Image (spheres, rainbow, N blue to C red):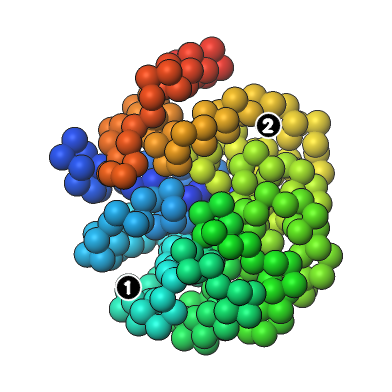
Amino acid sequence: MNQLRGTGAAIVTPFNKKKEVDFDRLSILIDFIIGDGVDYIVTLGTTGETPVLSKEEKIDIIQHTIRHINKRVPVVVGMGGNDTASLIKEMLSYPLDEATAILSVCPYYSKPSQEGIYQHYKLVAEASPKPLILYNVPSRAGRNMSAETTIKLAEASDKIIGIKEASGDMIQCMEILKNRPKDFLVISGDDALALPQIACGMDGVISVAANAFPKKFSSLVNYSIANDFVNARRINDLLIPAYQYMFEENNPAGIKTFLYELGLIENEVRLPIVPLSEHIHGKIKSYLKSNFPG
């Protein structure tokens, strides 16, 4: 679990102009992120456009990512769904031997009760071939996993090692931190809230911004963990506009625009996601020119 403290990058899936997975660009992006200090990589999360990837593409991405990283940093694989039985079957069919953990999103669309969420995760954890990190993101899943349910799950299974908490509810976050079992990881899922959440006791963040700003964002997280909030705030203040532009219209369209302007990937997404509007794209170009010249 110590491997998953600090900064994790929820990595995008680069596409070429034919909208095929661009494995060469994926390798370049991985090297850029790891080289600038990110502690681990999360592949096949929401930022990776998982809903529009085929099973074959997902398997290829997992294998390529693990092979290219070559144990330089841990790899967490995103695997979630709203059909518990199908998710378990799928989980057991993927090449996860060298993955460190699985990140599994709260069941979406179905809007289960708290008891339904608990039973879902309990079964998934029992079947999982790897340690499990819960992922609470009510803005996408349509249902919030309460602090009480999170703690209940943390105590129910040794396989459940942490949560990526992206509710944006600071009181809920503090309740989890107050009542969590020893060594249960609580990881921020909100770039813009990472500093105050780490100040409250969180163990790090799984970040979108770390794709484009791995060195700056990792330093922000490390300063925050070390309680050096003067330096953490200095970096955070610089990145606040970037957080806004990344999520103003859509993630990952926002972060892909940043990466395109940095020369790392093509600015390609798959429907129903579309590229950012010219207005926001222009703001990103101006922001990068002013704050990261050259």
Which residue is at the front of the view, 177 or 278? 278
Q: Taking 116 as reference, is 170 left or right?
A: right
The residue indicated by pointer 2 is 236
Q: Residue at x 76, y 59 (%)?
A: 172
Residue 217 place in picture, x, y as percent: 60, 38
The quadrant where residue 220 appears: top right
Label 2: few (<14), some (14–19) or many (≥20) C-alpha neighbours in 10 Å: many
Q: Going 38% across and 24% down the picture, which residue do you hit?
A: 277
Left or right: where 282 falls relative to 25? right
| Amino acid type of the residue tagged 2 in the rendering | Asn
Where does residue 202 sit, x and y in percent of width and height? Answer: 73, 55
Q: Which residue is mark 1?
A: 95
Farthest left residue? 18
Identity, as a three-letter code, of the amino acid under mark 1: Pro
Observer-nearest of 153 and 101: 153
Mark 2 lies on a secondary structure that is: helix
Picture quarter with the C terminus: top left
From the viewer's perspective, is 280 left or right of 266? right
Q: Residue at x 31, y 78 (%)?
A: 93
In contact (CB < 8 Å): disc 1 and disc 2: no
Q: Quadrant of the N terminus?
A: bottom right
Which of the labelled discs sits on residue 206, or is there none? none
Judge the density around disc 1: few (<14), some (14-19), many (≥20) Cα neighbours within 10 Å: some
Vertical comparison of 62 with 28: above or below: below
The first of marks 1 and 2 along the sequence is 1
